[in-house]
Image: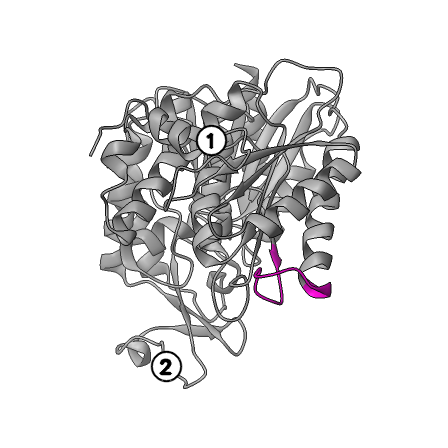
Amino acid sequence: MGSKMQTNAEHELLAPPLANEKNKIACIASLDTKYQETMYACDEIRRCGCEPVLIDISTKTLADRGAQIGPEEILRVYGMAWEDFDPLNKADSIETMARALEQAIPGFYSQGRFDGIISIGGGQNARMAAAAMKPLPFGIPKIIASSLACGKRTMEQYVGDNDIMVVHTVADISMLNDTTKTVILNVCHAAAGMLKNFKTIQPDTRKKVAATMLGITSKGVEGTLNRLPDQQYEKTCFHANGVGGRCMETLIDAGKFDVILDMTLHEITCEILGGYCTGANHRLEAAIRSKIPMVVVPGALDMLDFFIDEDGKGLPEDINKRKTVYHNASICHTKIYPEEAVRLAQVLAQRLNRSQAPVTLILPDEGFCEAAALGGPLYDPKADQAFIQTIRPLLKKEIKVVEVHGNINSPSCQQAAADALISITAR
């Protein structure tokens, strides 16, 4: 087996040079099994006034079926010849082609070989196409149509932290009939419509602020953002539910923000202690890599959440020892123990200390989420103080710490966070 010649990170994911019209739609397909259906898609793309760019990921044969980008070229980017690929068994050949496609697609886009991209097929085609589309820049049309985009399957495998659209094909993409033709037609016209009606967003000279929130911190976050003058700040919120934080970090890496208002660190709790909102590990690290200033509040860091399934299972064995409140019939919020607060304080301090940009940490003394306010079901000053007293001496002297009397959602915390952000962006 050949070795990789490049990694995705080595591709400069920039839009290709502007042409008179962005009208090239790539279609990822296995022409050795989906030739008829793919040709129908190409015809529809042409009827839309666009140019189809066929990307053939066939693994059974090297036969030329008219694709602009064939399996041999995809493998060549991966550093592998067809002669080395052809003897592989079915499972290895599919996995190898998937890795090769994932590596090749960003480079093809950067070369201007397509402007939008679609995939129409079954589960395997969708999985391979999704992995290849995820590294592509935010904003370009990306559509996956699959017979497996349904049921209890999660969207993570198809979407990740990118703006990929997913369509359930209803029927298997096997032969052409009224159902499959309708789905193919809609997907092709949707991609063409996005390209033809694409409007370049006018540059915004305001400071771009990224903020995190959950329902239990939303009052504090929104109150803080409302205190920032609209004429000076463009504000974008991310739902810190295990995906939103990851999306924010991806866009930070892409250079989309000037300053971070990270007021909901619940995903760090899930990363370290487990819980429902897992999936956004290594939070804060994108801003650290990009040397972007941060105002941080440990919002919802003081609670664990658990999902209760249809059989009533999902709660931890020690649930009767914890303070609890039910967000709804399926999700239970529980207060962390003081020893867990100490562990989280150590993790947060370790990450913040790595920042070379200005950092301000706001510490409200009456709970880090709505339910943990004075008199609330998760109010526990012992746990809160364990966190505050642990983190303060661990932080390097360059990090500014502001202690606030009140809950994270209180006006005092909102004002302190807004003042800190205005101050940090004025430096």
Of the numbered discs 1 and 2, the one sitting upstream in the chain is 1
- Asked which secondary structure carries label 2, the reply is loop
Question: Residue beneath label 2, please?
Answer: 313
Q: What stretch is highlighted in magenta?
A: 167-179
* Residue 421 in which image quadrant: top right
Q: Look at the image and say whether residue 168 sits in the magenta stretch.
A: yes
**Spot occupied by residue 200 in the image (x, y as percentages of width and height):** 74, 24
Q: How is the image coloured?
A: one colour
In this rendering, the answer to whether 427 lies above or below 60 is: above
Please give the name of the residue rendered at 48% of the width and 61% of the height, measured from the top-left corner: 154
- Asked which secondary structure carries label 1, the reply is helix
How many numbered circles does the render carry? Answer: 2
In this rendering, the answer to whether 116 lies above or below 15 is: below
For residue 399, the mark is none
Q: Which amino acid does label 2 sit on?
A: Lys
User: In the rendered image, which quarter contains the N terminus?
Assistant: top left
Camera sees residue 399: no
